[in-house]
Image (cartoon, grey):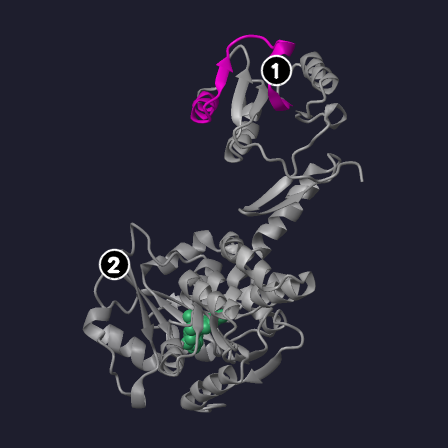
Amino acid sequence: MEFLPLFHKLRDSQVLVVGGGEIALRKSRLLAEAGAVLRVVAPSIDPQLADLVRGSGGQMLDRGYLSSDLDGCVLVIAATDDEPLNAQVSADARARCVPVNVVDAPALCTVIFPAIVDRSPLVVAVSSGGDAPVLARLIRAKLETWIPSTYGELAGLAARFRQKVKALYPDVTQRRAFWEEVFQGPIADRQLAGQGAEAERMLQAKVDGAPPHAPGEVYLVGAGPGDPDLLTFRALRLMQQADVVLYDRLVAPAILDLCRRDAERVYVGKRRAEHALPQDQINQQLVALAKQGKRVLRLKGGDPFIFGRGGEEIEELAAHGIPFQVVPGITAASGCAAYAGIPLTHRDYAQSVRFVTGHLKNNTSDLPWHDLVSPGQTLVFYMGLIGLPIICEQLIRHGRGADTPAALIQQGTTVNQRVFTGTLADLPRMVAEHEVHAPTLVIVGEVVVLREKLAWFDGAQYR
Ligand code: SAH
């Protein structure tokens, strides 16, 4: 190991920065975040850097560097483009046993800056020892996606209970087991889901020796329209910690593959008319599994609150007092529109957009047709294939032009995406001609013409 990682307490300590430009500014920001008092020496000092120095209660020395500038400093950063000067600063610092960092010159450094993931008080530092900083930064980017942004609050919660727990469990092995349970169980779940007060209450109860009550929980998660890359960080995290997964037909296999390997998988999908499990049975199953103490992932295509019956499912959970959290997903309209190159709104064509269910009860035309034909409005029909002839006919009858541009997007965002464009009058014929199948989204409105210029994704190219 070329460098030993240590974390340096700088609060209220003097740090010398030699150089007054952009790089000096970047390093100084980090130092200021750690509470250092900055002493900057340079013939000219960037105004933002000057602000930072003032804010830190430090001093600016508008002149060349003198070795006496090191007096009283616990750390020095050389950030100039003058190589002999950088070498001089390094030599002076080492002579005085003051740690020194010279930007972009590992050989002149006794300390180096790592790539940092800051979830204070939790901080992750990654270093390549100066050999491959870009690699360290890429690893950092991966960690950024993997460590929830609220992790710091979890550490904060632990800090508030640290002494109590220490007193309760003098034995370090017991204490470790206690904290492992906290960080991997429902208390951490609550904190990371943004329910800090509840997490605090549960941790207090645990400290008070209350028997753990059934810790089951349901995650209602939107899996997006198909492309696994469109999952949210939180969705992925919960997918990897759930004990059992209840999923829909719309959830792509590639997405299901990302769930924890040993999680039990239960298919509850619905196809039109042919329900694998009636909705109330799904609701009851969610309740039953959570009551067994399981972490239950209810994975739904798109967004759970858009034509997803997510509301009904969590109403049942709420009625039984079962904790749950809802993770939004990219809804089919957003996903398909983006991947088809059809902006749903556009200053010249559409000032509003409307998501409409095309699932017509008993095949009767029970939609508010008069509202749907007003100009400057994009219509997006979900579940619109079966009712399409009626939808098109009614829109035209109520005044939307038969030549209004329209698009069909089948399996949008996936490698199997197919897009067909035409007019409102053409749509039903296009469905038959191209053998269009569910899931397909229908977009009606002038914005559809933009696809000619803006199409960028060709599903087939990956086949
Ligand atoms: N909750 C989902 C919608 C469920 S309703 C969401 O927010 O996207 C099911 C309908 O969504 C399908 O009939 C189809 O119209 C549409 N849909 C979902 N995924 C789709 C996809 N990848 N491509 C095209 N349409 C899709």
Q: Is residue 148 above or below residue 225?
A: above
The CA span between labels 1 and 2 is 69 Å
Is residue 251 located in the magenta-colored stretch of the structure?
A: no
Q: Quadrant of ligand 1?
A: bottom left
- Disc 1 residue: CB within 8 Å of ligand 1: no
Residue position marked by numbered label 2 in the rendering: 376
Q: Where the C terminus falls, by quadrant? A: bottom right
Residue 270 shows in the view:
no
What kind of element bears circle 2? Answer: loop
Mark carried by residue 71: 1
Q: Where the N terminus falls, by quadrant? A: top right
Say which amino acid is labelled 2: Gly
Q: Is residue 125 above or below residue 85?
A: below
Judged by depth in the image, the label closer to the viewer, 1 or 2, is 1
* Image coords of residue 163 (percent x, y): 55, 55
The magenta region covers 48-77
What kind of element bears circle 1? Answer: loop
* Image coords of residue 58 (percent x, y): 48, 21
Residue 380 is left or right of residue 38, and the answer is: left
Q: Nearer the viewer, residue 73 or 242?
A: 73
* Image coords of residue 197 (percent x, y): 40, 62
| x 31%, y 76%: residue | 392
Residue 259 is left or right of residue 220, and the answer is: right
| x 45%, y 20%: residue | 50
User: In the picture, residue 349 is in which quadrant?
Assistant: bottom left
Q: Nearer the viewer, residue 235 or 63?
A: 63
| x 51%, y 32%: residue | 35
